[in-house]
Amino acid sequence: MDVYEAVESRRAVRAFSDEPVAVETLERVLSAAGRAPSSGNLQPWHVYVVTGDPLAELKERATARALAGDPGDEREYPMYPADLTPPYLDRFAAAAAQRYAALGIERDDPERPRKIAALNTRAFGAPAVLFCYLDRAMGPGQWGDAGMYLQTVMLLLRAEGLHSCPQVMWTMYRETVARAVGAEDGLTLFCGLAIGFEKEGVPPLRTGRADMTETVSFIGA
């Protein structure tokens, strides 16, 4: 699989099979991902990969919180700006409507928030979840580094025939995650990344993207 194919086929999968992912495959991916760009070569990411019984227990604990209507732990950073405006708000609304309609959750369902949270805390059935942390002393540049690292991981997973789904949602249950992985107090949970093989028979969902002309300007071309 070449790079263009990996980029084109990468999408946030929200239905995984229970087929386990070989540890050797994850080690190969994460070893190669260490070559991701990193300003000053700080390599600021701290990664925990959870599988098997520890992941099952984590899913159970987080899902119990979600179904109980637990609003979650105090946020360490906002998931989105509080005052989103067009075109960003329009893109967000369209993607959310498409995503959860595909999962069978209607917008006017009074249980919608709990159902969405519970799907996320089960990691959509993924047999492996990667949790990416950053030292609290790190700044915006290092958060950008973490994003480039995770994108590298996701593309390498595609090269291995695997899919993934980034999940910032896990930050809502960061204390539960921290206890499960033994994360140090000085670390901030950036996000989780569900990893696995796509479940067969589930129609693939691919949200649209803005045309390049909306986001790119060529100067001097």
Image: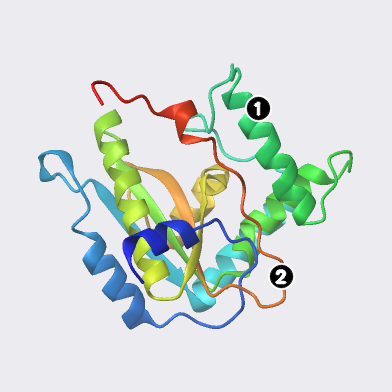
Q: The C terminus is located in which quarter? A: top left
Is 1 left or right of 167, judged from the image as shown?
A: left
Q: Residue furthest front?
A: 221
Q: Decide: is 218 above or below 70.
A: above
Type of amino acid under label 1: Asp
47 or 62: nearer the viewer? 47
Q: The N terminus is located in which quarter? A: bottom left
Q: Position of residue 104 (x, y in %)?
A: 82, 56
Q: Decide: is 71 above or below 26.
A: above
Q: Which residue is mark 2?
A: 202
Q: Residues within 10 Å of mark 1 (few under 14, many from 20)?
A: few
**Circle 2 sits in a helix, a strand or a loop, which is it?**
loop
Is 53 left or right of 38, judged from the image as shown?
A: right
Q: Which residue is mark 1?
A: 90
Q: Decide: is 160 above or below 166.
A: below
Type of amino acid under label 2: Val
Q: Residue at x 56, y 64 (%)?
A: 58
